[in-house]
Amino acid sequence: MVTVTVTGFVLDRVGLTFAEVADLDLGRWQLRALPLAGSVGVLAFGYALSAWLWARMVVEMGGPRLSPLTAVRVYMVANLGRYVPGKVLQIAGLAWLARREGVAPGTAMGAAVVGQGVALLGATTVGLGAFFGPNTTYRTVGWVGVALTASFVAATSVPASARLLERLWRRLAGERGGEGVPHDSPDPVGRPGFGVRWTAAYALNWGVYAAAFWLLFLGLEGWSPFLQVGPAFAAAYLVGYLFVFAPAGAGIRESALIVFLLPVVPRDAALALAVAARLWTTIVEIVPAAAFALVEARRGPVAERTDPPA
């Protein structure tokens, strides 16, 4: 109900109604096969890169080194949990599945929670570009966002303040899901420059996602500069994430994407693109995740073990 209310409010502010959403005609586009195929490939690569970054965070937190294929399989299956409100199942599922690969639950969950926090900084870094597009209305907000992001990156690069921010983030993540997050895993944020290194890595990851959405835009609407389109996708994701009650940001993310695309395309085109983006991300994520889930199911239950292999 809250998701519907917030979505309806945003749509009303941009002059759209649920009736227009229901009457949406996705057949209005002249599809361009090459950029559309490229968007699927680049988006899939972005998901794989997210999985690899999680695996690297596991190593930095003292866990074992996972192969790229194993990291992608575990991460993608666990990602199915984010379609449930609250986002806790995504993190809990990651810890549960990683046990089979010799990763201690505290390490897997700690890497997911800390990585998720830094990923939001990366998404913010890329998404801020949406506030500096043709419409100058949002530029003040954009500059405030630049200042805040720079402050957080600087703070997470100094060991003492980074540890404090990590403890606060772990506590918030635990409270959101209604369960505590383990605090006994190794603490990589004590290393100088942690914030700069990982924010840069996740900004690159979100640059890949933004490029994938730009290719989708080219395949559906035609040419538009990357900086007017790509960052809008990251900014909309960030808005959707903040509303934890919405499964995978459903409704909220689309509403935000419409707002960020309005300076570039008419409102009906922005609405159609938001719907298409949801279908596109869901299919590219769920199809391989479902295949990996079948592999996991055939392997049987996770063995009861407490210590990972050396």
Image (cartoon, rainbow, N blue to C red):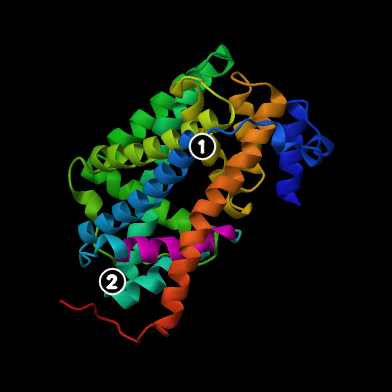
Q: Position of residue 131 (x, y in %)?
A: 51, 22
Q: Inspect this view and state whether residue 41 appears.
A: yes
Please give left or right for residue 58 compared with residue 109 in the image: left
Image x and y of residue 35, in percent: 47, 34
Looking at the image, which is closer to me, 49 or 294? 294
Q: Secondary structure at mark 1?
A: helix
Whole-angstrom CA distance, mark 1 to mark 2, is 41 Å
Q: Mark 2: which amino acid? A: Val
Mark 1 or mark 2: which is in front? 1
As displayed, is residue 280 above or below residue 227? below
Tag 2's secondary structure?
loop
Q: Is residue 156 magenta?
A: no
Reading the image, the residue beneath label 2 is 103
The label shown at residue 33 is: 1
Q: Residue furthest right?
A: 19
> x and y percent of residue 284 in the render?
50, 52
Residue furthest toward the left? 310
Q: Is residue 71 left or right of residue 61?
A: right
- The residue segment tinted magenta is 70-83
Q: Nearer the viewer, residue 157 or 303?
A: 303
Q: Quadrant of the C terminus?
A: bottom left
Question: How many C-alpha atoms fall within 10 Å of the one at disc 2: few (<14), some, or many (≥20)?
Answer: many
Number of the label disc, if any, that sits on residue 7: none
Disc 1 crowd, CA 10 A, few/some/many (<14, 14-19, 20+): few
Q: Amino acid at mark 1?
A: Ala
